Image (tube, helix red, strand yellow):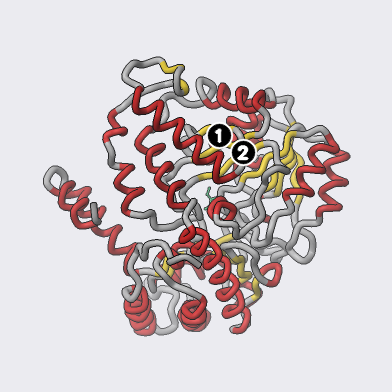
Amino acid sequence: MDNIRIVETIRQVDPTIANLCAAEDSRQADGIRLIPSENYVSPAVRAALASNFTNKYGEGYPGKRYYQGQRNTDALENEVRRRACEIFGYPHANVQALSGAPANLAVYAAFMKPFSGRIMAMRLDHGGHLTHGSPVSVTGQWFEISHYGCDEHDVLDMDQIRRQAREFKPDILVCGYTAYPRSIDFQAFGSIAQEVGAISLADISHIAGLVAGGAHPSPWPHMDVVTFTTHKTLRGPRAAIILSKDPQHADKIDKALFPGLQGGPHFNTIAAVGVALAEASTEGFKSWAHQVVANARALAAALAERGFHVSSGGTDNHLLLVDTRKSRGLPGKRVAIALEQVGIFLNFNTIPNASPLQKPLFPDGIRLGPPAVTTRGMNESQMPRIAELMDRALENVKRGRIEKGTGIWADPSARKALRAEVQAFASEFPTFAGFPENP
Ligand code: DSN
């Protein structure tokens, strides 16, 4: 079903929700979406989400359910598990996690007891995730944490991580990040974990689509367990998958997720994950994944050319970090709010080795990336235009004053003009351009 038919079907029952859906359709079409954890799913993925599988309940795993009537759900879940194993090369897949946080929690619960387990992972302000042991997450409250970070060049130092792991002796060594623009050396992480007797966990939520498309090295066979959300570069619905190598690990993880943490799986979502995996195994998807990395590099280069400070000097994946305070004297939050006003969506983000003024909710920079605009069909030739629109907006904002009622723009008419330019530029690209032809 296309967007209009979906909205009109809802409108017959609920005009309020229909209007909100229509407004969101417009927002997603009229703007330039650069949040690297977002994307546009295909019409087939959306249709699977709306399928009758939403009507079925069924706790447990295929062949071992607590409800009758599972002929189709068992076949569905087995097929989606098989596809995940085939694409990522792991022998075991659990496809029931509702999102990334319960997937990571299930892995911790499978291998550790609260108040005795030890996790070593990347610190949040250098690109780690809340579920990698942040003090505000139960993962940081229930387990002893040792965080590693980036070096003075904003990249990981594997020798330092090895020394830290030898000293701390974690039960689980985590790699995989939410805001790290460089390739991950899974082989090195796997060997460190093996040396210190830890389970190695790769949270590849951000890069799962790049791994599936061969645009980032694979964690197989180096990491024991892999978790990832399915809605970022994998271009699926909001859910998560857990892969494992060892059948005993797989058994512990299955039990930790259900009945340990969750109830019945969302079968309509699992169906949509299956469709996304079918799409991810095509040549067109591989081509798209490589285009995402090419676009991210082109965007980083275009911003650097305009004097923006790109953390670590560039990117190997789908995202980049820009220190806007260093580049333009503007903190990330002010930049993100101003750009939203012209229809460019990204998020304010901490930057490794930032100024002493940086705080988690008032960081020095922004995080951005081209997965969603690549799905709309953009390539390297459009990235300088995006950098130019951002630069012109920030040049105006830099001269603006933060005063109640006057906004943050030196010249509010420039904001209006830029908004129109962004809208015209975005309208040249459909929100789903299909999958590219064979590379
Ligand atoms: N870490 C969030 C992001 O990358 O946007 C999702 O959990």
**Residue 46 in the image, given as x and y percentages of width and height:** 32, 48
Q: Is residue 308 above or below residue 78?
A: below
Does residue 247 show up? yes
Q: Amino acid at mark 2?
A: Tyr
Q: CA distance from mark 2 to mark 1?
A: 7 Å
Identify the image quadrant of residue 216: bottom right
Q: Amino acid at mark 1?
A: Ala
Does residue 412 show up? no
Q: Are marks 2 and 1 in contact (CB under 8 Å)?
A: yes
Q: Is residue 313 above or below residue 16?
A: below
Left or right: residue 171 versus residue 105 is right
Mark 2, residue position? 90
- Few, some or many residues within 10 Å of mark 2 (<14, 14–19, 20+): many
- Few, some or many residues within 10 Å of mark 1 (<14, 14–19, 20+): many
Which residue sits at x=50%, y=77%? Answer: 383
**Residue 283 in the image, given as x and y percentages of width and height:** 49, 59
Disc tally is 2
Mark 1, residue position? 93
Q: Is residue 27 above or below residue 405?
A: above
- Mark 1 secondary-structure assignment: strand
Left or right: residue 23 versus residue 436 is left
Left or right: residue 4 versus residue 256 is left
**20, 294: nearer the viewer:** 294
Which residue sits at x=57%, y=24%? Answer: 256
Seen as rendered, the residue at the extreme front is 438
Which residue sits at x=61%, y=62%? Answer: 317
Which residue sits at x=37%, y=28%? Answer: 73
Badge 1 residue CB within 8 Å of ligand 1: no
- Mark 2 secondary-structure assignment: loop
Left or right: residue 186 versus residue 49 is right
